[in-house]
Image: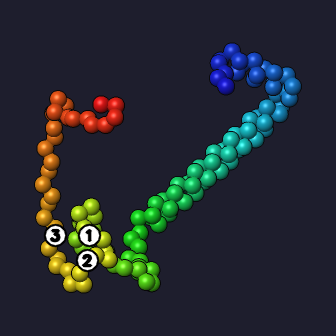
Amino acid sequence: MNLGFPEMIFLFLLALIIFGPKKMPEIGRQIGKALNEFKRASNEFKAQIEHEINQLEVQEHQILPPSQPPIGSVPVAQSQAAHPLQAEPAAAQPETQSSEPLPPQPERAALPESSVVVEGPNA
């Protein structure tokens, strides 16, 4: 709501006619006190919200201790964690396992599109 100068003069004159010149200073003080109280309450509310947000951020950044694995779970070997696609299933691995990582798999060369052979009933 944007009030221009003419609208403010009109409202002032209307209030002067309704309330009279003796009550206008008192009404102005009451309006000023109300606006000041509203501003103070809104600043207090804003400070409280910011304080709560800061507390939540501090709680999120706290480092939690490592949790214990569930009872009966099988620990994951170091080589499985490093190479999950290259590791053998846990049941097929021998009891003693070396800590050496698995050798990298050779990369397959990409075939040009002209050498791709499609076999099948619709070929």
Mark 3 and mark 2 lie on one chain; the one further toward the N terminus is 2
Kind of residue sitting beneath label 2:
Gln
Q: Residue at x 30, y 71 (%)?
A: 89
Answer yes or no: is residue 40 visible: no
Query: As displayed, is residue 48 above or below residue 78?
Result: above
Element type at mark 2: loop
In space, the residues marked 1 and 3 are separated at their CA atoms by 13 Å
Look at the image and tell me in which quarter the C terminus lies: top left
Query: As displayed, is residue 4 above or below residue 94?
Result: above
Left or right, 37 with reference to 73: right
Q: Nearer the viewer, residue 79 or 18?
A: 79
Kind of residue sitting beneath label 1:
Glu
Which residue is denoted by mark 1 in the rendering? Answer: 88
Quadrant of res 81? bottom left
The image's mark for residue 101 is 3
Which residue is denoted by mark 2 in the rendering? Answer: 93
Mark 1 and mark 2 lie on one chain; the one further toward the N terminus is 1
Kind of residue sitting beneath label 3:
Pro
Q: Nearer the viewer, residue 1 or 102?
A: 102
Element type at mark 3: loop
In space, the residues marked 3 and 2 are separated at their CA atoms by 14 Å
Element type at mark 1: loop
Answer yes or no: is residue 112 visible: yes
Q: Residue at x 86, y 29 (%)?
A: 19
Left or right, 109 with reference to 30: left
C-beta proximity under 8 Å, tags 3 and 2: no
C-beta proximity under 8 Å, tags 1 and 2: yes
Q: Nearer the viewer, residue 61 or 103?
A: 103
Q: Residue at x 63, y 48 (%)?
A: 42
Q: How many marks?
A: 3
